[in-house]
Structure formats: structure tokens, C-alpha cells
Amino acid sequence: MFIRRLLLALILFCNAVLLYNLVWSDKGVFAYLDLKNHQKQLKMRIDALAGRSLDLSQEIRWLKSDRAFTEKMTRAHGNYLRDNEIIYLFPGQYPEGSVGDDIKN
């Protein structure tokens, strides 16, 4: 009788430990759900970066082959001018490191 109670207590204790490890440990269900959510976020980020990479690859090809596109990008991002053109830069409208930084100071 005593051995049966001791065995039952041991089994209940083992079940409690296993339940704790299943649910609340660092390898439990909640950790698994967190990792699964993190994996989904990383997969979405990878997909977005793959799309961005494809766009940048296309832009590189255009910059290498299309003179009009190269001129358009240079004029838009570098504040370059053609002959007889004037550029007006207003505060907050030019990117960091561009010609407008000289005007601010």
C-alpha cells in the first residue's frame, strides 16, 4: 500500500515536471509559437528584400544601358544641371550630403 502511494506520487511528480517542460520551458509550446511567429516575420522580410533586390538589379541594368535614365537619375538625386538652368533649393527638400548642405551652413 505504501509502495503504491509512493509510486503514484512519483508518477504525479514526473507528470508535473513534464507538463512544466512542455508548456513553460525555453523549448516549450510558447517558445515554439514565438519562434514560429519570428520565422514568419523573417520570411516576409526576406520576400520584401528579394523584391527590392530585383528592383535594384533592374535599375542597375538601366543605369548601365540607358543614357536617358542615367541622366534622369543623376539630375534627380545629384542636383545636376544642364546648361542655362538654375536650381532652387529650399530647406528640407534636398537629401543629406547633397549640394544643399553647402547652402545651409
Image (cartoon, rainbow, N blue to C red):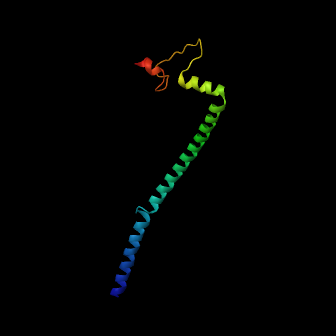
Residue drawn at the location 61% of the way across and 24% of the way down: 71
Compared to residue 68, the image places residue 3 above or below, namely below
Q: Residue furthest bottom?
A: 1
User: Is residue 17 toward the left or the right of residue 60 in the image?
Assistant: left
Q: Residue furthest left?
A: 2
| Residue at 62%, 31% in the rendered image | 63
Q: Residue at x 42, y 68 (%)?
A: 19
Q: Is residue 98 above or below residue 83?
A: below
The image shows residue 25 at horizontal and vertical percentages of 40, 63
In x, y percent, where is residue 100? 47, 20
Quadrant including the N terminus = bottom left
Image quadrant assignment for residue 65: top right
Residue that lies at the very extreme toward the front in this rendered image: 64
Quadrant location of residue 51? Answer: top right
Q: Residue at x 58, y 22 (%)?
A: 75
The picture places residue 22, in percent across and down from the top left corner, at: 44, 66
* Left or right of residue 39: residue 7: left
Q: Nearer the viewer, residue 100 or 1?
A: 100
